[in-house]
Each structure stands twice: as C-alpha cells, then as structure tokens.
Image (cartoon, rainbow, N blue to C red):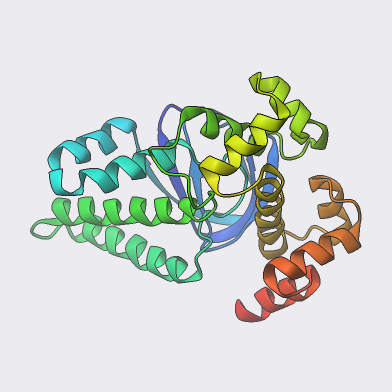
Amino acid sequence: MSEHRQNFFELVYIVNGTGKHSINKNQFTYHPGNMFLITPDDQHSFAIQETTQFYFIRFSDIYIKSRKEQEGRDAEWIRRMEYILRNASHQPGCILCNPGDKVLVKALINSITTELVNRSLYHQELISQLVNTMITIVARNIAMTMPEKVSDSTGNTVMDIINYIQENIYTPDLLRIESIGAHFGISEGYLGRYFKKHTGESLQQYITNFKLKLVEMRLQHSDMRINEIVAELGFTDESHLNRLFKKHKGLSPTGFRKQFVLENV
C-alpha cells in the first residue's frame, strides 16, 4: 500500500498479519490487534511482511459535526472529541494505550462485521452507535497522551507548541527552549511560565514524558534495540534512558519489554 495522503480520518485495525506501518517518515511494526489513526494530511503507507487483513473505518469532520447537531445532550463531549482528534499526535504506533480498550475494540469490530453481514432489523442504527463508541474509545486513548490540563478551551498557541514538539521530537536542537521561543516569537522566560500555566507541566517534563511514551511503543511493538531507541530519541546514553524509564514505569526498558511479551503470548 504505497504512500499517500487523504482528506479524511481513517481508523485502521489489524485483524491478522504483520508488517511495517510508515507515517510521516516514521516506521512502526504492526501486529494483530493494533489500531492506527490516520488524520487528514498525514502521509502513510504499509509494507506487508505476512499476509494481512486490514479493517478500515473512514469518517470526516462532517460526520463528527453532524453528530454534534443531532445529539444535543452529548454536544459537549462530541466537541471535545472533535478537538482531540484534530490535535492527535502524528507519531507512528498503535493508538490503543489502554489494555482494556484493545479487548473492547476487537469486540466492536466483530459486532460491526456481524451487523454488516446479517443486515438484521435496525442494523444501520446499531452500526452507527458502534462506530461512535469506537471513535470515543480512540479519543480517550489520545487524551491519555496529552497533558492533563489541556482541553478544548486551551488556547491555540499552547496546542501549536505541543504540535511543534511532537513534530520535532527526533531533532533535539529544535526542542531547546531558545529554539521553541524563537519559532513562536516568545521570550524564553515567559514561554516556560506560559506553557506550565496552561498544561500543568514544564516544557522539559512534557518533552521527556512524550519521549517515554514513544519508548513504550517501541518496546512493545518493534524489535528495535535499546541503543537504537536511545539514538533515535536523543537520550544521552542507555543509562540515562534506563534511569528515566525506571522512574516512569518502575521497570527497566528490557524488563518492560519482557513483561509485555509474557503478557501477550
């Protein structure tokens, strides 16, 4: 599946098979049960290693906005969901970071398929509700990777800074406070105070936490060696990553990977 762009949202669920998913020039190994979110303007492709069955769910802004108009009592949540999807991290990897949601998504996929095949009474209404539930689960998992204080009322500048950090996470020089300040025309002193006021985290805390989330994904779903992860994400050395990761997860990166493998045998 060659590299391409699209003007809609796309959820891609891996029913079976393995291979590589490339998104915005970053690569990730996929396995059954993984789900990816492709947002408008993302560039992505799949390199299939083992025969793969994909399940695609596609929707646009119009779909979300129409739900907001139809379901007045849920308008607040749908507005927040639209915001989260629009500001999703454009990084490679399975978006299901909550283990319980992986089980739930698999059941939803099976239920949607059953309704499509059987076409029983009210099947369209049921499919609509199942898809809405799926999108809500995706929004929840994306929200788990964002600073706690960030919400749909957060100013555009903060979101622009977060997006800038995510886009340049592999380029340490561009993540220095002076580089970020120069990019946005904000003094270094004010930038730090402004970011912490609106997110509850310092810039350095946010950058470190975001890198550690990417480390988790690579340990769980790729065969990258620890020294390769260190080099890719700009950690000083392996001991630096070990120290930060153990503080973050209570395990060394190697121990975390072994535990994940044992739990998913």
The x, y position of residue 128, in whole percent, is 21, 50
Q: Quadrant of the C terminus?
A: bottom right
Q: Quadrant of the N terminus?
A: top right
The correct choice, above or below, for 18 with respect to 41 in the image is: below
The x, y position of residue 163, in whole percent, is 58, 34
Residue 48 appears in the rendering: no
Q: How many marks?
A: 0
Q: Residue at x 71, y 34 (%)?
A: 168
Residue farthest toward the top in the current orientation of the protein: 185
User: In the image shown, does 52 or 241 lie closer to the viewer?
Assistant: 241
Left or right, 208 with respect to 200, comes to right
Q: Residue at x 65, y 30 (%)?
A: 190
Residue farthest toward the left in the current orientation of the protein: 121
Q: Quadrant of residue 137?
A: bottom left
The x, y position of residue 221, in whole percent, is 67, 61
Residue 262 appears in the rendering: yes
The correct choice, above or below, for 7 with respect to 205 in the image is: above
The x, y position of residue 43, in whole percent, is 58, 31
Q: Quadrant of residue 188?
A: top right
User: In the image shown, does 191 or 86 lie closer to the viewer?
Assistant: 191
Left or right, 113 with respect to 253, comes to left
